[in-house]
Amino acid sequence: MLRQLYLCLGYANLALGVIGIFLPVLPTTPFVLLAVWCFARSNPALADRLYSHPRFGALLTTWRDEKAIPRRAKICALSMLALSYGVILWLSESDILVFALAAIMGSVAFYIATRPAPRGGSETLRHVSCTDR
């Protein structure tokens, strides 16, 4: 029963991650990370497919093995956070929203910035771009 739940959650998170590729307000990476975690507990073959994916595989493997984020991915993520917050500042009329999102986005930015770079260097992760949210 629990295995089926993890499998359903894995597919749901993967679907949200795919939707996030096309919608700038929905992040891709956290959902793909959750999907691979759920698949590892329900269907390891599906987790292996994500780990061997040409686009996400190297990033997922680096995160699983080292809890590391490549420098280029960090720069892109932090840039997108800053750009998003700038748009919020420009469009929002609510001071509460601006402060709440500053705390949330600032915490996320701090977490991303403090993750180590991969030990093996970013040579194998050269394909990372700002569109890989």
Image (cartoon, rainbow, N blue to C red):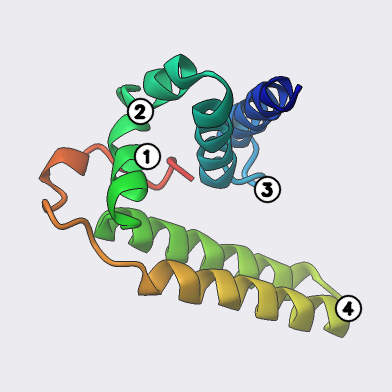
Q: Quadrant of residue 83?
A: bottom right
Disc number for residue 51: 2
Nearer to the camera, 27 or 13: 13
Answer with mark 1 or mark 2, whichever residue precedes in sequence: 2
Q: CA distance from mark 1 to mark 2?
A: 6 Å
Badge 1 marks a residue whose secondary structure is helix
Query: Do we see residue 69 in this rendering?
Result: no
Answer with mark 4 or mark 1, whichever residue precedes in sequence: 1
Q: CA distance from mark 2 to mark 4?
A: 42 Å
Q: Amino acid at mark 2?
A: Tyr
Classify 10 Å Cα crowding around label 3: few (below 14), some (14-19), many (20 and above): few
Mark whose residue sits in front, 4 or 1: 1
Q: Quadrant of residue 99?
A: bottom right
In the picture, the quarter occupied by the N terminus is top right
Classify 10 Å Cα crowding around label 1: few (below 14), some (14-19), many (20 and above): many
The residue labelled by disc 1 is 60
Badge 4 marks a residue whose secondary structure is loop
Q: CA distance from mark 2 to mark 3?
A: 25 Å
Q: Are marks 1 and 2 in contact (CB under 8 Å)?
A: yes
Q: Position of residue 37 (x, y in %)?
A: 53, 37
The residue labelled by disc 3 is 25
Q: Amino acid at mark 1?
A: Leu
Q: Residue at 62% across / 44% down in the picture?
A: 24
Mark whose residue sits in front, 2 or 3: 2
Badge 3 marks a residue whose secondary structure is loop
Q: Amino acid at mark 3?
A: Val
The residue labelled by disc 4 is 94
Q: CA distance from mark 3 to mark 4?
A: 19 Å
Nearer to the camera, 92 or 18: 18
